Image (cartoon, rainbow, N blue to C red):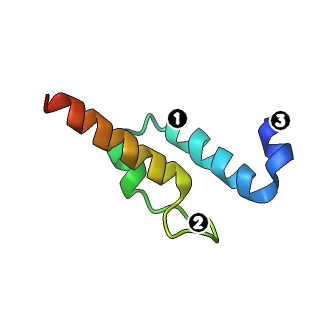
Amino acid sequence: MGRQQLVGYAGTKRMDTLVAAVTASMMFEEIVDFDWVYSSPSAVWDPIQQAAGEALKNITREKGK
């Protein structure tokens, strides 16, 4: 919650994204494909979605070994 106060509105929306994902027990695939109402003004993909996509790639790569 302290992070919200330090980063302002955009950070608050990212925190909302994380809370929604955790509350819904979302898998990485669901986070990557989810259509969030809020999107960062600096990127097409929300950083949370980008991180989930990278995690998914790493998991897939590890399973292939």
Nearest to the eye among marks 1 and 2: give it: 2
Q: Is residue 56 left or right of residue 9?
A: left
Say the numbered circle drawn on residue 34.
Answer: none
Q: Residue 57 placed where, x, y %?
A: 29, 43
| Near-viewer residue (36 or 64) | 64
Residue matched to label 3: 2
Quadrant containing the N terminus in the rendered view: top right
Element at label 1: helix
Q: Residue furthest right?
A: 5
Query: What's the amino acid at mark 3?
Result: Gly
Query: What's the amino acid at mark 2?
Result: Ser
Residue matched to label 1: 22
| Near-viewer residue (22 or 41) | 41
Count how many numbered circles sit on residues in the image: 3
Q: Is residue 9 left or right of residue 65?
A: right
Q: CA distance from mark 1 to mark 2?
A: 18 Å
Q: Residue 49 placed where, x, y %?
A: 47, 52
Q: Which numbered disc, 2 or 3, marks the residue that appears first in the sequence? A: 3
Identify the image quadrant of residue 37: bottom right
Q: Are marks 1 and 2 in contact (CB under 8 Å)?
A: no
Neighbour class for label 3 at 10 Å: few (<14), some, many (≥20)? few
Q: Which numbered disc, 1 or 2, marks the residue that appears first in the sequence? A: 1
Compared with residue 29, is residue 64 higher up or lower down, i.e. above or below? Answer: above
Seen at 49% across and 63% down, the residue is 45
Residue matched to label 2: 39
Seen at 58% across and 42% down, the residue is 18
Q: Residue 10 placed where, x, y %?
A: 72, 58
